[in-house]
Image (spheres, rainbow, N blue to C red):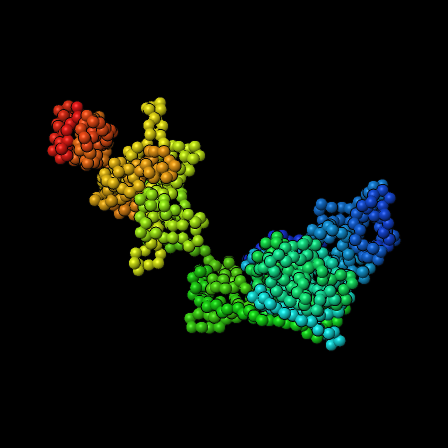
Amino acid sequence: MRIPLSWIRDFTPVDAPVEEIVDALNQLGLEVESVEQPGQDVSGVLAARVLEVLPHPEADRLVLVDIEAGSGTTRVVCGAKNFVAGDVVPYAPPGARLPEPFGLIEAKKLRGVLSPGMLLAPDELGLGEDHAGILHLDPAVEPGSDVREVLGLDDVIFDLDITPNRPDAMCVTGVARELAAHFRLPFDVPEPKPATSKAVAADVSVVIEAPDGCPRYTAWVAQVALGPSPGWLAQRLVKAGMRPISNVVDVTNYVMLERNQPLHAFDLDRLAGPGIVVRRAVAGERMTTLDDVDRELAPEDLLICDAQRVPQGLAGVMGGSTSEVSDATTAILLEAAYFERMGIARTSRRLKLRSEASARFERGMDPEAVARHSARAMELLVEVAGAKVAPAPIDEHPQPVTPAPIRLRPSRVNAVLGTDLTDREVVDALEPLGIATAPSGDALTATPPSWRPDLEREIDLVEEVGRRIGFERIGRTLPDTKGQIGALTDRQRVRRRVADALVGAGLSEAVTVPLVAEADLERAGAPLDRLVRAANPLRAEESVMRTRILPGLLRTVAYNRSHGLTDVALFEIGHVFLAPVGNDGVLPDEPEHVAVAFAGQVRRRPVEDDRMVDVFDAVDAISAVADGAGLRELRFEPGVRPGLHPGRSGAVVADGRELGVLGEVDDEVLAELGLEGPVVVAELVLDEIAAAPRRVRSFQPPSRYPASAIDLAFVVDDSIGAGAVADTLTLTAGPLTEDVRLFDVFRADALGAGRKSLAFGLRLRAPDHTLTDQEVAEIRGRCIDAVSKTHGAELRG
């Protein structure tokens, strides 16, 4: 937003250096994007009166313009045509200087005709970016006058980036109020007092059918003489980045820029009724806006209609084409209103139609100042358009909007800002901004002004105090770190170690959607007695929260298989959701689980033959998890688990507590998912892993002596678990045992019905010597005897 310093000085006598004003605006949160001082680069530009406009003999797009600039007649070549004889325009003769990229002006030939200088558009004088036509000066300006003085080019223009939460700063008075408070200067906005005439009838009606969208609407009638605006008004609009159009339209833009009140002038004679109806659009209704675009409306759009309910404008966005003012306009109805901001924002975005008015309405306006700003426009129309104004506006106010008081604790202000302000200093910081305060026990009751809809909470007022006192008064402090230790909780460390262990084992992490199909849960053996159902699921068939991770992970395996990725090793750590039991609460329980899934082949060539995944891949992954989490002991106990193969599944146990399940997915489940086996999975409760006993981590120097290996194969009953045999071997071999690992499971008729062979590899090592053959043989014999007696095993030759 562009704001001239000269305009700010109409309301507060700011006389600080430009650098100080820029620093103040930045500190106040009104970021200065650029500062323009166009007069610094302009010299030698004169006011010239147009005497005659002639066609160019060699170019249709150029014209020859005879001008008088105080020293006789001069003919220049020009590409614009928005002027006629009698207009006064800026002329840069040879030797004049303009802002870059124009620089020093010289005489040039244009299509065979010498042009001693040029007529200037606003952007060529450094006044914004408007290049649509030549700038018009006040017709009363004497030819030959210095344009720097005529346009006040010694002015300073601040281009501000106003954040969406500061609607009050979208105008000159809002910025002036902030600067006045900062520099402790007086601030005054004169009360408008337009001259009215009883001879002007105000026989119009206003009906508000949608008070939720339009809590206030004023309509004021005036007779006007349409024409160009005087130079001072046009110059201010140009400096602010707007193109002057006509005195009536320019006044509405001027008040919007000065007071932050968008206005709209209807041609009263083109309004049926005459009158105004504010209503919602009907589905499929259409209207043509001022930009000559026919638009389809929606029932949520707010319309300004005439008394016959014909749309004349999109409320707060843009007027319609049927009742806009024109050169033939002699009477106007001036609209000033307060519209609900979110409705304006939705309409503007849906129609992709953004205007200066909508940008202000959707941020929030001042509902209390609507009539006062309308009076300011009438005051100006009397001055620049010879307006005769009706005695009073029609002011419909069905839903008054009043700011809610906010409880403000000075102690909270100091706690947030790190200051030691007194109550009086807090009050003194807020009052210049129009924020009224009153004592209320150990706090203050602060009432925001009507022009600050962004002030809703205590923290908003704390920010205002911080802006007002200046950030340089907020001392730099270091946090008190005494007694603080930056570290992860034990639970966080376990979670990270589990994930790191699985990644190290070659698995890839997956993240699946927690909404699943109830049939998938049932198929995978997940509990169904504590389901949490979604009230509005994305897909009707996936309407319950998962009670296990595996159903989603299996769907991911199937998805990969359908895309040609047959060999996968995935894991996921996430929450499952269980409905609360009884009256324990309204929120579900959310324990965290870890699940793994293997499918396809384990690729080992050329080291060894490739093989299909088996349950021992899951055993290795869970063993890696246990090792990473530092569990003291881990067991795999056979057993039937829903959704898993009855002979190839079981429980994962630590210190007598079941951590989860492990096994090969049942063929029926695979068939339902369209998968080919084998698929091996495991799912553990992360909370149980974290709660399981840990081994004491202590350093033991590695032995420098070689290890001895023993391979033993036992034929046992099918009901005997490999883990139980491994435990017996570990206990019997004693402290010299480095590792006991199952490396083969074999079943055959030759072993007998219900019998299997379990082959184990033992690695033994002594810390202080090389084991002798006799020591190894003794340990081997003890292990064979122990397994035979404990499990009824037979040593397999």
Residue 534 picture location, percent across and down: 40, 53
State which quadrant residue 303 falls in: bottom right
536 left or right of 788 in image: right
Q: Nearer the viewer, residue 462 or 166?
A: 166
Residue 428 picture location, percent across and down: 52, 68
Quadrant containing the N terminus is bottom right
State which quadrant residue 209 falls in: bottom right
Q: Is residue 215 visible?
A: yes
Q: Is residue 763 visible?
A: no
State which quadrant residue 580 falls in: bottom left
At a point 14% along the width and 34% down the height, the residue shown is 791
414 left or right of 366 in image: left
Q: Nearer the viewer, residue 687 or 294?
A: 294
The vertical placement of 308 against 49, above or below, is below
Q: Which residue is outermost to the bottom?
A: 198
Q: Nearer the viewer, residue 359 or 613?
A: 613
Quadrant containing the C terminus is top left
Residue 508 picture location, percent across and down: 38, 37
At a point 83% along the width and 55% down the height, the residue shown is 84
Numbered label tally: 0
At a point 30% along the width and 60% down the height, the residue shown is 583
Residue 585 picture location, percent across and down: 33, 59
